[in-house]
Amino acid sequence: MSRRLPTLSTGRIAVAGAVLLAAVLLVLAPASVVFALVFLGALLYAVHTGRRHALSPDGTVRAAVFLVTAAGLALPALLGLITTSSQTLDSLLQPNAAFRKDLALLALVVVGTVAAARFWPARFQDRSFVLLMVTLAVLAKIAYVSVVQAEPVSDFASMWRLSSSLLEEGLEATRSGLEGNRWAHFERILPFLFPVRTAFGPGPAAYAVPNVLLAAATSLLTYRLARRWFGRTAARVALVLSLLAVETTIIAEIPTHEIPGAFYTLLALTLFQIAWDLQAQGRSRAALLVGAAFGLSILVLDFQRSTGSVMLLSTTLLGLGLAVAGEPSQEGERPEGGKRWTRLRRGLPLVLVPVLAFALANAGVRGADLRTPPEERAKGAGIGLASATDSAGDGSYVYYANNYLWRYGLSGVNWQRLALVKLASDTHYHPGARLIHYLRKARALFTLGTQTYFYLYEAKFLEGPIDPVAGRIYALCVGFTSLFLAALLVALARIWDLPALRLPTLAPLFFLATFSAVLLLLAEIQPRYMFPIWYIGAIYIGALFGRSA
Amino acid sequence: MGPTLLRSPELRIVAAAAVAATCLGLAVLEVVAARTDLLMLDLREWRPVGSRPDAAAVFKSAQTAPSDLRPLQLDLRLARPGSPSDFLAAERTFEVDGDGCYRFRVYVWSPTPIHTAKSIIAVNDEIAWSAPLAEASPGKGVSIEGVRPRQGTVEVRLELRADPVRASPAPRASPASPASPAPSVRFEYAVLRQAPCGEREEGAGG
């Protein structure tokens, strides 16, 4: 019986040889030699493959986003799903049947509303669906936060008190009143919230109701982005998922900056989309104006949630990719311009204008002493790096790490240098542990929803008997998170071949994946930092029901 | 995920480029780490020494185990002292190149500002620095200058010792009192490097 042997290409033989050599050298040689050899092997493979194939700029950008998404978002989300679903299982196995009923009811509501969004009759306008869902969600959430009336704990309580005193004393905008207190800043940027505060007085409703309203506004931005890219059905599904996300309701009980942070994130992404749409339509001047507004919105985001640098980095990189690859003016058309340099010349201004707008506005607010000087910010960043890059971290909530080091207040220490030396030392002693550290932190970062519960209820647990309502809310949080992460993973696996997946549609995904990767590599982590995932993730889950269907 | 993207040459090239960039960065970091004298000391391989037979066990449980991947910090915790002379220490001998002078620098952190214990740093069997835990709380940078190697080695001993004499002026806590916290200290960011010879002295700061 003759069997045909599999053929081996030269490239495969080279890779296999390089892997074998690296494995032998790993035992015999210092680590740097192995790294250098793998580097050479990978580089030769890339060059060899590049010479054999004509590369498409569009495909290269997609491939880069795919890799960042796989490492920064999909893998951590998978680990988070495993962890969270085991907690859900624990909840289900509780002797208290209320957990099972709650989770069953939650699953029923999620499936029912998603089905309603999917099969919404065409004779009814989309607007009526949006109005119905948003109204129902806002009323239910306001009723919930009015009943619960949770008192903020931890730093949120002090943030709220400081904000109240600052605003009630009528202080002018200062660094301590803006950057030092993100809630006060939130109200100054969005002055329409003042009447709400006045109406509800100094109690929890004064921040809970604005939180609910702003979360609904963020869901509307989610709807808009999903509709623009993936169609009405996708948009309806994205809308209901973001409205149903349990954490967006629970976190509204405290004066958090997660909700305004998510709002500014979606606002920036919407402006990015509008700017590139205008560019594709040939309206370059309008595109540049919106691009400048996009840059300013990144600054506002940076004030509110300190994620502006990641937004600027990810959108600038993607913008460069767009400028090189070109963007079809209509769906399915080939990029305009033909030659790469022509496309680059047209697209480059739209890449640079947001960066310039951000930089100029940032310099302006710093000049007006409304922003911490860069050297102080660098000091803080150095401490964060020093505290978080040690592979000692167990990956659970290391939120105390920064405060812990801050308290030591060692004057005269060059923290940035210390952080780099620590990074080099840690990597030198434990190169393999860095990977484990990444995975541990990933698992902890994606236990989404659990930290809100911690802020709201764990402190109360320490003071008195366990509140059974808190346990049920926890079960709902982990239950919804399990469903959401599972759906997101399916979406991340399937979206790449959607005909509607043009390069600008990757901007939210690229931002989220880059943000997650940066957190896991360099920074302190808390699951609530991933809060925008309830909106951005919903867009891509919705895409599964959209134009691909 | 779509087969189109997975089979595309672009993905293979981008993946190879990412691997190459990562390995290049790691190789450079390794070379820098091997050549710099700023590399922090690996604090996992220290010999435990204690005043009681069970001190070693206390040390092992109090010190972060290597399996916890904590190479750059050493935690010492004294079980509530049974006698005033209880101590727990970690010793290590470092081989050094050359006969010049060295500087040993370490940050000492103590979460509890208590007076009933002190931390000690001894170099080559001489006490080079000593202070109550209260002075090392929340943290203190200690720099010991002018360390001369003995036969190509420098021996360092990091110690935590019960010191009830210093309980004054605060009310002296009973050693077994459940209200008094167990003394603990953390040594971190330890560096031993060559430095100009001068008068041997100790100092604190960054």
Image (spheres, rainbow, N blue to C red):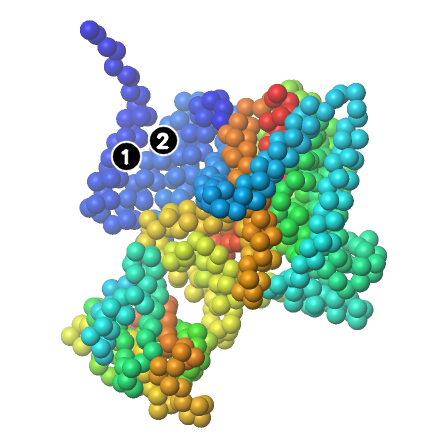
Q: Position of residue A236 (x, y in %)?
A: 69, 31
Chain of the residue that carries numbered disc 1 in the rendered image: A
Rendered residue at 44%/90% (across/down): B171
Rendered residue at 64%/50% (across/down): A250
**Measured along the vertical axis of the image, is residue A248 above or below residue A336?**
below
- Crowding near pointer 1: few (<14 within 10 Å), some, many (20+)? some
Q: Which residue is mark 2?
A: A45
Q: Position of residue A117 (x, y in %)?
A: 69, 28
Q: Amino acid at mark 2?
A: Tyr
Residue A18 disc label: 1
Query: How far is mark 2 from mark 1, CA to CA?
Result: 10 Å
- The reply, left or right, for residue A396 in relation to residue A336 is left
Q: Is residue A24 visible?
A: yes
Question: Where is the C terminus of chain B found, in terms of image quarters?
Answer: bottom left
Q: Position of residue B173 (x, y in %)?
A: 40, 86
Rendered residue at 32%/35% (across/down): A41
Of residue A343 and residue A266, the one placed in the foreground of this image is: A266
State yes or no: discs 2 and 1 in contact (Cβ < 8 Å). Answer: yes
